[in-house]
Image (tube, grey):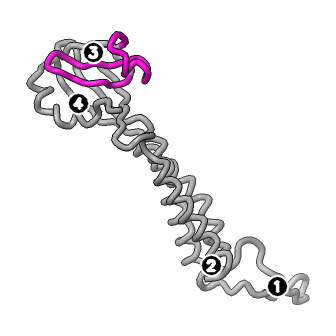
Amino acid sequence: MNFLSSRIFLLISSLLLLSLSLSGQSKPGKVVSKIKVFSGESSYFGYFQHLDSTGLYLANTVMGLEQPSALIHRPFSSVDAIKLRKKGSGTTGAILGVLGGVATGYMVGWLAGQGDDCSYRTVYFLGSPIRVKPIGPCGPGEIGAFMMIPGAVVGGIIGLVIGNSSKKFTFDGSYDNVRKQEKAIRKFEYRR
């Protein structure tokens, strides 16, 4: 492993450790979930607080989750379906996608550059031989470093799409449907 390759590996390792320490919710065990409630022809956006035997409780803002007076109650009879996702999951997905893309791009570039010797080549210009050095990245380390950029872009996009996906629960106004899905829904309840 040459000097450039070892520095790039160290950079990737550092970024991975940093992102794992920063990703997710701000406190361990803290859960804040975004909710979209479908009710007939209309829909409501907010932050999911909890559910009980009568319906769903949500707030318009994150601060409203801690204020009982700011909670909005939606009875199950008026709810057709909900979509839930944890706040910050898109950012976490994008960070992990970028890091995975950087690592994959570097490895693909490093493997692709294995046979490249980066020596001067003889090119004939108007019948005269000229020795030229190749233009662009040359060798496993440089090609690997170059391939990290498209890897990061593709990985970030894929991570963002996966991270922003939400889980849909269908109620059709029936508490029986809620009870069947209650355990999965409770994973999204607000916790400090």
Q: Which residue is mark 2?
A: 140
Instruction: Give the x, y percent position of residue 156.
Output: 52, 50
Answer whether labels 3 and 2 touch (C-beta < 8 Å): no
Q: Quadrant of residue 189?
A: top left
Residue at the disc numbered 4: 169
95 or 63, which is in the foreground?
63
Q: CA distance from mark 1 to mark 2?
A: 23 Å
Looking at the image, which residue is at 53% across and 65% down?
13
Q: Is residue 57 magenta?
A: yes
| Quarter of the figure that contains the C terminus | top left
- SS at mark 2 in the image: helix
Left or right for 146, reference 106: right
Which residue lies at the image location 45% right of the left edge and 38% below the top edge?
88
Looking at the image, residue 8 lies above or below residue 40: below
Q: CA distance from mark 3 to mark 2?
A: 57 Å
Query: Residue 6 sits in which quadrant?
Result: bottom right
- Badge 2 amino acid: Pro
Judge the density around disc 4: few (<14), some (14-19), many (≥20) Cα neighbours within 10 Å.
Answer: some
Labels 4 and 1 touching (C-beta < 8 A): no
Residue under pointer 1: 123
**Image: magenta residue range:** 47-70
The amino acid sitting under disc 1 is Val
